[in-house]
Amino acid sequence: MEIKYLGTAAAEGWPGLFCSCDHCRRARLAGGASIRTRSQAIVDESLLIDFPPDTYLHVLQQGLDLTRVTHCLITHDHSDHLYAGDFAMRSGAFAHRQTQEELTVFATLPACEKIWPVLSKHNDSEGPTVCCQIRPFEPFAAGRYQVVPLKADHAQESEPVIYLISREGRTLLYGNDTGWFPQETWQYLKEEGHLLNLVSLDCTALQLDWRRGHMGLAACAEVRQKLIEMRLADDQTHFVINHFSHNGGLIHDELVPVAAELGFSVAYDGLTVPV
């Protein structure tokens, strides 16, 4: 497996949409990896994670080919992770597709309730878009992948989840948006005993010491240490931080050495990492 980070920012993007703070100013000047769009990722060019308003930008800038995507995982219904209206663009005269494969979207109920009305008005009889409700700790198959949604510590009315994604003996933990994992999630990870080949963690707050709803560098380092102590990760596990807010202060080149000291790589828009 491999994962490609298409976007790596929190809700406001970085530079922030309406922001002129020093951190956004320095990001604009630095350019490159310091320019971050709203978070989205894809596994093996076929399993999409989240569907933000920047999806179209990712098609243009990151080479995202949505015609190859057959399954999509939604973490929660916040607008920077789910822009449901764009699912209409897959149907009718909006898209002349060469193949008629279904696109299956997996989401918890609050996100489904935003997707279903769109699909009821805009869908195709051949190769339709299908939205399936999922629940934490109930495994399901997404094509070639075995997926387990785990409870996240985020806005609970959104029923947020993070994902364990496995294929052919390799396992990825995609962990944003969340603070310190809920106890049920730690317990599930312990009981299942998956050795994690790649762990991608929410680090929205960066230098700020956030542990609820989102995490910063200190909390991410503690999650990493706990996974190692639980023998769910080892010295071959690749740890990556992702989902950054300008409020955390460190643009990309400043963040890389700080993260490396803690055992992390830093995601940026366009980064591809083998699992």
Image: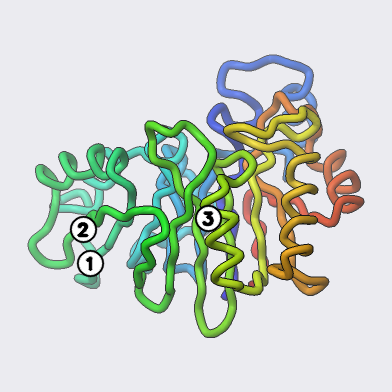
Which residue position holds label 2? 130
Looking at marks 3 and 2 on the same chain, the residue that comes earlier in the sequence is marked by 3
Is 273 left or right of 145, judged from the image as shown?
right
Q: Nearer the viewer, residue 43 or 239?
A: 239
- Residue 103 on image: x %, y %: 27, 62
Give neighbour class at mark 3: few <14, some 14-19, many 20+ (Cα, 10 Å): many
| Residue behind mark 1 | 102
Q: Residues within 10 Å of mark 2 (few under 14, many from 20)?
A: some
Give the quarter of the image for residue 35.
Answer: top right
Above or below residue 169? Residue 24 is above
Q: Measure the alpha-carbon separation of dots 1 and 3.
A: 20 Å
Tell me where residue 10 appears, x and y as whole percent.
58, 34
- Amino acid found under the numbered disc labelled 2: Val
Measuring 40% from the left and 78% from the top, which residue is drawn there? 144
Residue 274 at least partly seen: no
Residue 266 visible at all: yes
Disc 3 and disc 2: Cα gap in Å?
Answer: 20 Å
Q: How is the image coloured?
A: rainbow
